[in-house]
Image: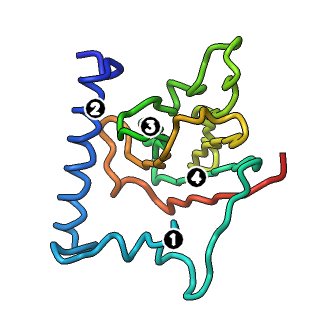
């Protein structure tokens, strides 16, 4: 199956999210009674302190940094950072990750460079890896309604193999 075929991709993403929700419930991160509308009310989450909110200017550049460490030999332990872009109908429009480093790739396209991924940046002597995702909101296609950041362990690694994962979002003026 070509996961970039629209129907296959939508099924793939649906299955991916469905399994993530199932795993989250099994680990006790949420229950069947969790009201996610309250958690994500006004576009913010519980990670912010009470009373805090985050506003993003539509002309901003957003840099998202993720890093991780691993124990022992490298052996392909990656924490992947992927960004999924959905339209107003809820359909997946683009995927940005280590292998698709420009979500809107056509250079003649007005959206070229709207979303970039650094690819894997490994610091082997430090047992550390990093990624940087850059979003230029003023270049983003107008039909994009939602963007989701997804973290996952690559290949045979599991999240238990990942040490000290972190994600940092920084708003910068364009």
Mark 3, secondary structure of its residue: strand
* Residue at which label 4 appears: 67
| Above or below, 4 relative to 76 | above
Of 78 and 45, the residue lying toward us? 45
Question: Which disc is residue 10 wearing?
Answer: 2
Q: Is residue 41 left or right of residue 6?
A: right
Q: Nearer the viewer, mark 2 or mark 1?
A: 1
Mark earlier in primary sequence (2, 1): 2
When asked about the image quadrant of residue 116, the answer is top right
Question: Which disc is residue 87 wearing?
Answer: 3
**Cα distance, mark 2 to mark 4?**
28 Å
**Cα distance, mark 3 to mark 4?**
28 Å
Q: Is residue 127 left or right of residue 57?
A: left
Mark earlier in primary sequence (3, 1): 1
In the current view of this chain or complex, which residue is farthest to the bottom? 50
Mark 2, secondary structure of its residue: helix
Q: Position of residue 150 (x, y in %)?
A: 43, 48
């Amino acid at each position: 199956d070509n996961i970039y075929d629209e129907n296959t991709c939508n099924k793939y993403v649906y299955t991916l999210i469905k399994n993530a929700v199932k795993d989250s419930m099994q680990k006790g991160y949420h229950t069947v009674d969790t009201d996610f509308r309250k958690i994500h009310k006004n576009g913010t989450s519980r990670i912010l302190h009470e009373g805090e909110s985050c506003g993003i200017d539509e002309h901003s550049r957003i840099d998202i940094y993720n890093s991780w460490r691993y124990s022992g030999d490298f052996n392909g332990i990656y924490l992947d950072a992927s960004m999924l872009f959905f339209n107003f109908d809820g359909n997946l429009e683009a995927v940005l990750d280590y292998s698709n480093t420009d979500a809107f790739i056509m250079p003649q396209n007005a959206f070229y460079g709207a979303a970039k991924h650094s690819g894997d940046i490994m610091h082997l002597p430090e047992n550390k890896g990093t990624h940087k995702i850059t979003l230029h909101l003023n270049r983003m296609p107008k039909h994009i309604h939602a963007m989701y950041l997804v973290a996952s362990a690559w290949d045979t690694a599991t999240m238990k193999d990942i040490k000290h994962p972190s994600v940092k979002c920084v708003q910068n003026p364009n």
